Image: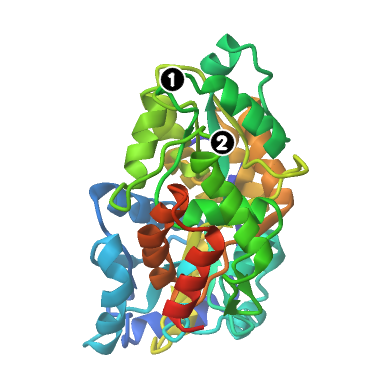
């Protein structure tokens, strides 16, 4: 595994300090919620595919290099079903101790996740080694509810061949919206559009955060903020005013826009760095990476990512936290960066994502992480996404303004 050998001799120091091991082992052996008598810790997570299972097994197998006693079992439904079924699973018999969550869903699962601050302090865990934006994303009511394993700044992918053919300068770690629009208009010819757009609020939110505007303020949904409306309107305008993109249908998945990009039907798309390997393997052109365009041209990333938390009704939190420490060690996250393409949440491990990629790609990711904001949400965020998918189409087509669309969603959510 690339990146592991250099860190192997430092494995004790690079991860969480493995203090209290005997106590944790005793807790695991005693059995109880999420900790069967064989000493294993049960983790409930999303298992939509074999790829999901292989990812979790990767964390566990690599974690055993840090802590040979690590014994984690996994179970769970599909990603879509996870967010509702996790509540039922925790109320059933022998509930799991470990849970996974996205930063964007941490508020939604806040009532199920144990605050970790006391365990962090007790075990002298150095959380400053993790991306600060992701830690903020995993914080609910002032307490950390999960330890992130990745920190993925949303980026803009582009077709280098198309840019070069059009005589355009290739964007790198800076990209202004003025230059983006200029490039996109030169690339848009006839029925060919330069930019691919998907339905939903995730990407317009990344667009707004690139300019320093957020949809949540002090834990409250703030969709009627005039600055946010201006940002979303400028994103709608890429379709109905600037003409560089086609309006998505409410039923369109992100897969459609992604396929359009790798097929060369559009020249640019906003997505996460976790898609780099997939795009590179499918695209028949040279692919570039740059920041989500901002007014100033400076990098400001919206980070997305996931992490490991502990269920509030877990009877062996020490054993569960010990497992989290092992699975988020530097060795593990470097290995997952190489094997699974994640951008690690640990600052020391992030260089592993750059392996096998052009130097410019890593520079873009680092520029975005130096000035990053997590996608903060509210418990009703799933409803926000659903409603934006439904009503956003009218905004792209110019039938409604962003102000009207966002006001409707704010009213419907009831905040």
Quadrant for residue 169, please give it: top right
Which of 173 and 72 lies nearest the eye of the viewer? 173
Which percent across, then down, holds residue 103?
51, 66
Is 90 left or right of 247, judged from the image as shown? left
Query: How many residues crowd around disc 1 within 10 Å: few (fewer than 14), some, or many (20 or more)?
Result: few
The residue carrying mark 2 is 242
Which of 217 and 147 lies nearest the eye of the viewer? 217
Residue drawn at x 52%, y 58% is 401
Is 390 left or right of 380, judged from the image as shown? left
Which percent across, then down, holds residue 277?
44, 33
Give the structural element (helix, strand or loop) at label 2.
loop
Quadrant for residue 288, please give it: top right
Which of 7 and 81 lies nearest the eye of the viewer? 81
Upstream in sequence: badge 2 or badge 1:
1
Residue drawn at x 21%, y 88% is 93
Identify the colour scheme used.
Answer: rainbow
Which disc is residue 190 wearing? 1
Q: Where 43 falls versus 29 (above or below)?
A: above
Give the structural element (helix, strand or loop) at label 1.
loop
Q: How many marks?
A: 2
Residue drawn at x 39%, y 33% is 278
Which percent across, then down, holds residue 4?
54, 41
Which disc is residue 129 wearing? none
Q: Quick check: can you spot residue 106? A: no
């Amino acid at each position: 595994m690339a990146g592991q050998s250099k860190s192997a001799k430092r494995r004790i120091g690079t991860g969480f300090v493995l203090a209290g091991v005997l106590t944790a082992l005793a807790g695991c052996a005693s059995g109880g919620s999420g900790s069967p008598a064989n000493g294993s810790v049960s983790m409930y997570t999303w298992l939509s595919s074999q790829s999901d299972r292989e990812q979790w097994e990767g964390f566990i197998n690599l974690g055993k290099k840090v802590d040979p006693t690590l014994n984690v079992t996994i179970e769970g439904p599909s990603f879509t079903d996870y967010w509702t079924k996790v509540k039922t699973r925790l109320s059933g018999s022998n509930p799991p101790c470990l849970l996974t969550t996205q930063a964007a869903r941490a508020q939604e699962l806040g009532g199920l996740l144990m605050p970790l601050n006391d365990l962090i302090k007790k075990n002298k865990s150095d959380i400053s080694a993790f991306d600060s934006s992701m830690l903020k994303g995993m914080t609910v009511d002032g307490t950390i509810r999960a330890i992130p394993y990745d920190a993925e700044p949303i980026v803009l992918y582009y077709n280098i061949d198309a840019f070069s053919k059009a005589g355009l300068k290739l964007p790198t770690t800076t990209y202004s919206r003025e230059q983006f629009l200029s490039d996109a208009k030169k690339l848009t010819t006839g029925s060919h559009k330069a930019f691919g757009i998907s339905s939903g609020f995730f990407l317009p939110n990344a667009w707004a955060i690139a300019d320093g505007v957020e949809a949540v303020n002090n834990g409250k949904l703030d969709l009627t903020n005039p600055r946010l409306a201006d940002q979303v309107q400028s994103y709608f305008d890429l379709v109905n005013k600037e003409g560089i993109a086609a309006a998505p249908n409410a039923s369109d998945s992100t897969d459609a826009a992604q396929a359009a990009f790798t097929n060369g039907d559009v020249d640019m798309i906003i997505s996460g760095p976790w898609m780099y390997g997939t795009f590179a393997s499918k695209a028949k052109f040279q692919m570039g990476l740059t920041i989500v365009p901002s007014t100033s041209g400076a990098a400001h990333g919206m980070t997305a990512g996931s992490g490991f938390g502990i269920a509030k009704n877990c009877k062996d939190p020490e054993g569960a936290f010990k497992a989290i420490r092992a699975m988020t060690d530097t060795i593990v996250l470097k290995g997952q960066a190489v094997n699974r393409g994640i951008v690690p949440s640990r600052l020391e491990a992030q260089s592993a994502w750059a392996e096998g990629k052009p130097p410019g790609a890593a520079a873009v990711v680092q520029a975005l992480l130096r000035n990053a904001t997590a996608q903060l949400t509210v418990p009703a965020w799933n409803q926000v996404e659903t409603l934006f998918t439904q009503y956003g189409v009218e905004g792209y087509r110019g039938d409604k303004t962003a102000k009207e669309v966002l006001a409707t969603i704010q009213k419907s959510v009831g905040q």
